[in-house]
Image (spheres, rainbow, N blue to C red):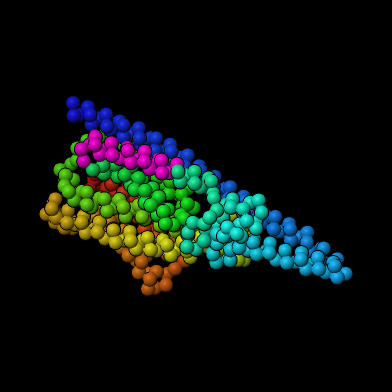
């Protein structure tokens, strides 16, 4: 009977995971819709401002009388105001600013349709319906996802991160949950497409490539250190996921800013909803610093667990080596940026390399390298 109950709970868990993936997919579409709609709205404001300025200049040139001069002065003032609106929407070359409500109202019919993010990534008064719908769907998805994780834990009678399937499903849940928690204080909805997209990829990979039925753990994993060590690793990996998305956007935003500064066409209008490359870099650096502390504890607690399980703190097992490699890469990132002046694209690439090492460690190493940490469940 207990086996039947466990199997049933495992089936419920898989159903919840499927529903969560479907909900995330709709949320992903809503986030993408928000970016596309807001980009079109900002472009419409630009064209309207440019058209208004173009029609008023000839009137000023043809004015000779005093009345005409007064009209020309009024038109000039109106044109300057329009230019200011457009300038505030576009923001300076070095940063992308979100206009205030008063400025948005002066922008005409497109007011509040899609505003660019400010440097502090704070919420403005404007209502972006697609973004709000996307966040609501993501909240619904994470609740369904939590039900899937909990039922898996109940069915297994333990914490649900004993193999690759469980680590991916739990890791995706934590990544989305951390994203939603950060949304309480910071307007990071521009990251929604990337974070939710990564969660979908993780759930699909877990179900297709790493599915493992509910079962007992190998003896080496039957320890309270599993809860301590792996939970911190999952949380740190979730934070690294956020910084990976920020670093990727930083590279795109940096290229866009250089192109616009050189007089080129702005072909990435949706990036006006994203803060400047410098703002992304600064926030990514702070989150990476927190995640690095968590990864340090992951390494330390893993060594303590190894001593309890195998009688030695370090044995140069493949998993141990790559956990240390990740620590070294992020330590180098923090050190280079803080003391060596490695900012901009070099810092972004270091952060991306660090995350690629995390992905390699939890996929390729677990699946293809034999060792004491071969717990993929495959």
The residue sitting at 53% across, 46% down in the picture is: 129
Give residue 340's position: percent from left, percent from top.
39, 73
Name the side, left or right, on which 264 lies relative to 137. Answer: right
Among the 4 quarters of the image, the one containing residue 243:
bottom left
Residue found at the very far right of the displayed protein: 65
Q: Which residues are magenta?
A: 137-158
Name the side, left or right, on which 71 lies relative to 85. Answer: right
Q: Quadrant of the C terminus?
A: top left
Residue 143: within the magenta?
yes
Give residue 366's position: percent from left, percent from top.
28, 46
Residue found at the very far left of the displayed protein: 311
Residue 163: within the magenta?
no
Q: Is residue 204 visible?
A: no
Q: Nearer the viewer, residue 65 or 305?
A: 65
Dominant secondary structure of the residues highlighted in magenta in the image: helix
Give residue 72's position: percent from left, percent from top.
80, 66
């Amino acid at each position: 009977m207990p086996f039947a109950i466990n199997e049933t709970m495992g089936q419920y868990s898989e159903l919840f995971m499927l529903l969560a993936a479907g909900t995330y997919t709709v949320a992903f579409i809503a986030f993408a819709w928000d970016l596309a709609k807001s980009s079109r709205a900002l472009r419409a404001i630009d064209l309207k401002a440019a058209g208004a300025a173009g029609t008023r200049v000839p009137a000023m040139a043809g004015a000779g009388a005093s009345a005409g001069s007064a009209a020309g002065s009024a038109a000039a003032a109106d044109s300057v105001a329009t230019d200011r609106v457009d300038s505030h929407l576009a923001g300076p070359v070095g940063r992308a600013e979100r206009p205030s409500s008063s400025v948005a109202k002066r922008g005409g019919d497109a007011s509040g349709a899609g505003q660019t993010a400010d440097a502090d990534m704070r919420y403005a008064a404007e209502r972006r319906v697609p973004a709000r719908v996307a966040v609501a769907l993501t909240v619904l998805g994470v609740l369904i996802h939590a039900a899937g994780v909990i039922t898996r834990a109940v069915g297994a009678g333990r914490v649900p991160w004993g193999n690759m399937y469980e680590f991916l499903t739990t890791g995706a849940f934590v990544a989305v949950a951390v994203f939603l928690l950060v949304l309480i204080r910071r307007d990071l909805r521009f990251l929604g497409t990337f974070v939710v997209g990564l969660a979908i990829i993780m759930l699909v990979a877990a179900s297709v490539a790493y599915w493992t039925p509910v079962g007992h753990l190998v003896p080496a994993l039957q320890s309270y250190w599993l809860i301590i060590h792996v939970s911190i690793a999952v949380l740190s990996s979730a934070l690294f996921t956020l910084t990976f998305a920020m670093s990727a956007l930083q590279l795109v935003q940096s290229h866009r800013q250089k192109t616009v500064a050189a007089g080129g066409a702005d072909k990435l209008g949706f990036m006006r909803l994203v803060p400047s490359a410098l703002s992304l870099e600064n926030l990514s650096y702070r989150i990476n610093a927190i995640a690095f502390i968590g990864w340090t504890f992951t390494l330390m607690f893993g060594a303590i667990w190894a001593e309890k399980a195998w009688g030695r703190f370090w044995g140069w097992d493949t998993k141990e080596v790559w956990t240390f490699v990740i620590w070294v890469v992020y330590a180098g990132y923090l050190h280079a940026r803080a003391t060596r002046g490695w900012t901009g694209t070099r810092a972004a690439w270091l952060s991306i390399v660090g995350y690629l090492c995390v992905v390699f460690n939890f996929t390729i190493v677990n699946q293809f390298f034999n060792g004491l940490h071969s717990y993929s469940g495959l």
